[in-house]
Image (tube, grey):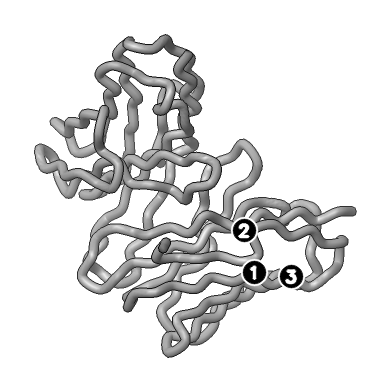
């Protein structure tokens, strides 16, 4: 079983809709990362968090350490939000990241 | 240019040939990483390096060789390419993964096809 599970694997939304994608992990972590990968593109870091909530523009990331779960919310979604969103976790004392398989998000105009 | 770069961006090679993928970063980050990305899998770590002349295996190291003679460069060599090594390869760097707040910065990727 993968250390990091993401759901849903694929999501299609209409422009303007509120989107939620999820990440669950099975190990104790020191940090969780949300990354974004556009089609054919590179990978950029959106958030790094270890507790609570972070907001950047229309993106909100939350984490519940007790439940080993994180969500990434996209408000007022736009076609440019179409991308693969990757969740990665760093276990305490480990200098490596464990990655989920990604959430493929498509926003239709 | 500042940042992390990879070359080539696209490569087609034949089975059995040796291929080297280059990675260069300008931040003087201590750590560098090589990942491969395949459909149905998350990013998988091939090798990483904590400093010049220090390298270590990741999750899927077989068939790959790395070196790190200079801090800024971390080449990945496929000694005898196989079709199963067709993938997109990402290089990444970070300053200090042991420090909270450390982030990894990814290169643009190299799409490798082995025929």
Distance between the alpha carbons at the discs numbered 3 and 1: 7 Å
Q: Earlier in the sequence, mark 1 or mark 2?
A: 1
* Crowdedness near tag 3: few (<14), some (14–19) or many (≥20) residues, C-alpha within 10 Å: some
Q: Residue at x 48, y 33 (%)?
A: B88
Mark 1–mark 2 contact, CB under 8 Å?
yes
Q: Which residue is mark 1?
A: A21
The extreme left residue here reads B53
Give the image location of residue B58, x and y in percent.
Answer: 25, 47
The extreme front residue here reads A1
Give the image location of residue B69, x and y in percent.
Answer: 13, 31
Local SS, label 2:
strand
Q: Which residue is mark 2?
A: A103
Q: Which residue is mark 3?
A: A19
Quadrant assignment, res A66: bottom left
* Crowdedness near tag 1: few (<14), some (14–19) or many (≥20) residues, C-alpha within 10 Å: many
Chain identifier of the residue bearing label 3 in the image: A
Question: In front: mark 2 or mark 3?
Answer: 2
Chain identifier of the residue bearing label 2 in the image: A
Chain identifier of the residue bearing label 1 in the image: A
Q: Earlier in the sequence, mark 2 or mark 3?
A: 3
Give the image location of residue A12, x and y in percent.
Answer: 79, 58
Quadrant assignment, res A99: bottom left
Tell me if A15 is positioned left or right of B20 in this view: right
Mark 3–mark 1 contact, CB under 8 Å?
yes
């Amino acid at each position: 079983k993968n250390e990091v599970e993401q759901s849903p694997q694929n999501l299609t939304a209409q422009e303007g809709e509120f989107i939620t994608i999820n990440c669950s992990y099975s190990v104790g972590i020191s940090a969780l990362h949300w990354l974004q990968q556009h089609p054919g593109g590179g990978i950029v870091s959106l958030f790094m968090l270890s507790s609570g909530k972070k907001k950047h523009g229309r993106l909100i990331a939350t984490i519940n350490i007790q439940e080993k779960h994180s969500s990434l919310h996209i408000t007022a979604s736009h076609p440019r939000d179409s991308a693969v969103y990757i969740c990665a976790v760093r276990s305490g004392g480990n200098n490596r990241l464990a990655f989920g398989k990604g959430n493929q998000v498509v926003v239709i105009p | 240019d500042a940042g992390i770069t990879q070359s080539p961006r696209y490569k087609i090679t034949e089975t059995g040939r040796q291929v080297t993928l280059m990675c260069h970063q300008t931040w003087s980050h201590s750590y560098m990483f090589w990942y491969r990305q395949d459909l149905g899998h998350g990013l998988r770590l091939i090798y990483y390096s904590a400093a010049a002349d220090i390298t270590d295996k990741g999750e899927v190291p077989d068939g790959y060789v790395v070196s790190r003679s200079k801090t800024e460069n971390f080449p990945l060599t496929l000694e005898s390419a196989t079709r199963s090594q067709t993938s997109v390869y990402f290089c990444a760097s970070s300053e200090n993964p042991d420090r909270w707040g450390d982030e990894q910065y990814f290169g643009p990727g190299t799409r490798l096809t082995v025929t």
